[in-house]
Amino acid sequence: MSAGHRATHWGDLYGRWLLITDSTIVAAAGWTWIELRNATNPMTLAEFWIRVVFFGYWALLLGVYRSRDPHLMGSGGEEYQRVLRATFHMFGLFAIVSVLFKFNVSRFALGMSLIVGIVFLLLNRKLSRMWLNRQRARGKQIFKVVVLGGDTAALNLAEAFGRDTALGYRVVGVCVPGYLGALGQNIEVVDRVIPILGSEDRIVAAVTEAGADTVAVTATEQLGPEKMRELAWHLSEIGVSLLVSPGVFDVDQPRVRVRPAGSMPLIHLAEPQYEGASRLHKVLFDRIGALLLIIGFSPLLLAPFRMIKFRSMVVGADKMVAALMAQNDGAGPLFKMREDPRVTMVGRFLRRTSLDELPQLFNVLRGEMSLVGPRPPLRREVEEYTEVIKRRLLVKPGMTGLWQVSGRSDLPWDEAVRLDLSYVENWSMVSDVSILWRTFRAVARSDGAY
């Protein structure tokens, strides 16, 4: 058995689990259809077997569409999209066939079967993913990756994988093109070291030594097309997956397209839609959402507003910053203190529950802010911005954002900037809705609030 096959044994077992549960759910959806149809107009034996064939085809399509691909498990929306595509493929085909051959079809039974199938297939994938992500947070059920590239590229990949454990990738070694040093050298990543396993010529041996099941190549220019093709052949023979990194980070999948140029694939990156954050549908989303939230929180807004105006700090707090700077827990231009003496007793409660931010709903309603966007900066912070960081000012600041749902005040400054720039570059309505949902969960847990 190859090293790659041993390493991905967890993927085989997890895939079998999904195969069994998918098939069970498809069978339940089929039983729903048949029972509802028989309750009004019993079907013939031929009609029964036609439906059995189609539902078998549905279960088969979930495999054909590779919805159980191990590299999709744990993160991203592609797994769910493939489940939906397979489902609508089957039901669309059945609709066409039923019209052509004039089948007697109960639309109610068909619709209920579709609903049962979609709801429980997606719910099963979500619950299975939650279990998988808990395992990956403990270092289990992961892909062991050997990076073929330079030190910097390996560091970037290792840090990216470390930020999102749900991806399930862990760098276990590096092969550096043209490396002539002694084996046993290491590169440091956060709280661990990654061994350098040699040059590109040792990649197959390095994979075996590290027990890896995946190779991530960042040094495509140094290798050239011939060596890349040979590498793909060698890795395929030992059951090891090959990933190729284009060297760009914080680019969401909807902006990425692979376009063939003769025999060479090119990765096309769509331009960032900076103007998207001011389009009509986002404006309507912000204004209507803010109005509904104001109405929903009106008892909280009306009661304390007249008394304390949501003040969470003592009067003149801004003038005390210089005296407290030595105790700053923040990074970059941010000033943060876990035990800030300027915060009042009531203010601590307001901050922990994020109630101090509710008046910003009126700013959103007036068009001065957005529900979702980069963190609103202070003037003194903006004065210290570099040209790169100033790009976060291309869109309106938000009441919440990626920074809010990824650690809030616990985030290092560089990570907060990266998240804000990622939002600006990859904005979409889907991401706004997702961030709002994650915000409610983060606020309920008081994650990183102080």
Image: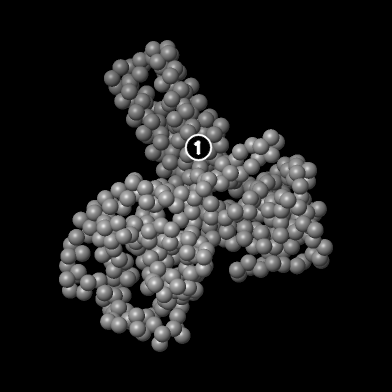
Residue tagged 1: 82
Residue in front for this viewpoint, 433 or 267? 267
Residue at 45%, 80% in the rendered image: 328
Q: Position of residue 332 (x, y in %)?
A: 49, 74
Q: Quadrant of the N terminus?
A: top right
Residue 151 in the image: state x and y as whole percent. 70, 62
Secondary structure at badge 1 equals helix
- Seen at 30% across and 78% down, the residue is 313
Tell which of 125 and 312 is nearer to you: 312
Residue shown at the point (50%, 42%) measured from the top left: 79
How was the colour assigned to the protein in this rendering? one colour
Q: Residues within 10 Å of mark 1 (few under 14, many from 20)?
A: some
Indicate whether 28 appears above or below 349. Answer: above
Task: Identify the residue at image location x=33%, y=59%.
Answer: 369
Q: Is residue 292 left or right of residue 152?
A: left
Residue 115 visible in the snapshot? yes
- Image quarter of residue 317: bottom left
Image quadrant where one finds the C terminus: bottom left
In the image, farthest residue toward the top = 101
Residue 304 lies, with reference to residue 435, above or below; the image says below
- What's the residue type where badge 1 is placed? Arg
Judged left or right of residue 326, residue 43 is left
- The image quarter containing residue 263 is top right
Q: Is residue 346 left or right of residue 97?
A: left
Residue 6 in sight: no
In x, y percent, where is residue 23? 48, 33
Q: Is residue 101 above or below residue 123?
A: above
Residue 292, how many percent across, how many down?
24, 53
